[in-house]
Amino acid sequence: MDRFILLMLAGIIAGFTLVNAPLTGFFAGIAPVTDVIGVLAILVFSLYLIYKGIKDIIGR
């Protein structure tokens, strides 16, 4: 289970990397798309970790 949680944290870090990636030149046109994908990755992985934490606290 620990590796799975680390994988989720890696997904959050990858989302922050996508949001902060400087895209210039040919790739400047896809910058808004990478921002949206990054924000969605951060939200999905963070909400899943919060859900798992609350589920473990409740003991369900």
Image (spheres, rainbow, N blue to C red):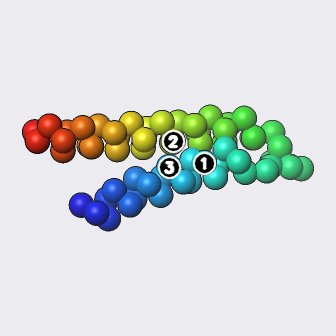
The outermost residue toward the right is 25
The outermost residue toward the left is 60
Q: Are marks 2 and 1 in contact (CB under 8 Å)?
A: yes
Mark 3 residue crowding within 10 angstroms, few (<14) / some (14–19) / many (20+) = many
Secondary structure, mark 3, is: helix
Q: Residue at x 26, y 43 (%)?
A: 52
Q: Which residue is mark 2?
A: 42
Q: Are marks 3 and 1 in contact (CB under 8 Å)?
A: yes
Sooner in the amino-acid sequence: mark 2 or mark 1: 1
**Viewer-side residue, 32 vs 8:** 8
Q: Residue 31 appears at what percent x and percent y? A: 75, 40
Count the marks: 3
Q: Which mark is residue 16?
A: 1
Q: Residue 22 appears at what percent x and percent y? A: 79, 50
Q: Is residue 28 above or below residue 1?
A: above
Residue type marked 2:
Ile
Secondary structure, mark 1, is: helix
**Viewer-side residue, 50 vs 22:** 50
Q: Are marks 3 and 2 in contact (CB under 8 Å)?
A: yes
Q: Residue at x 72, y 35 (%)?
A: 32
Residue type marked 1:
Phe
Report whether 59 appears left or right of 49.
left
Sooner in the amino-acid sequence: mark 3 or mark 2: 3
Mark 2 residue crowding within 10 angstroms, few (<14) / some (14–19) / many (20+) = many
What separation in Å lies between label 3 and label 2 (alpha carbons)? 5 Å
Quadrant in which the C terminus is drawn? top left
Q: Which residue is mark 3?
A: 12
Secondary structure, mark 2, is: helix
Q: Residue at x 34, y 44 (%)?
A: 49
What separation in Å lies between label 3 and label 1 (alpha carbons)? 6 Å
Residue type marked 3:
Ile
**Viewer-side residue, 31 vs 47:** 47
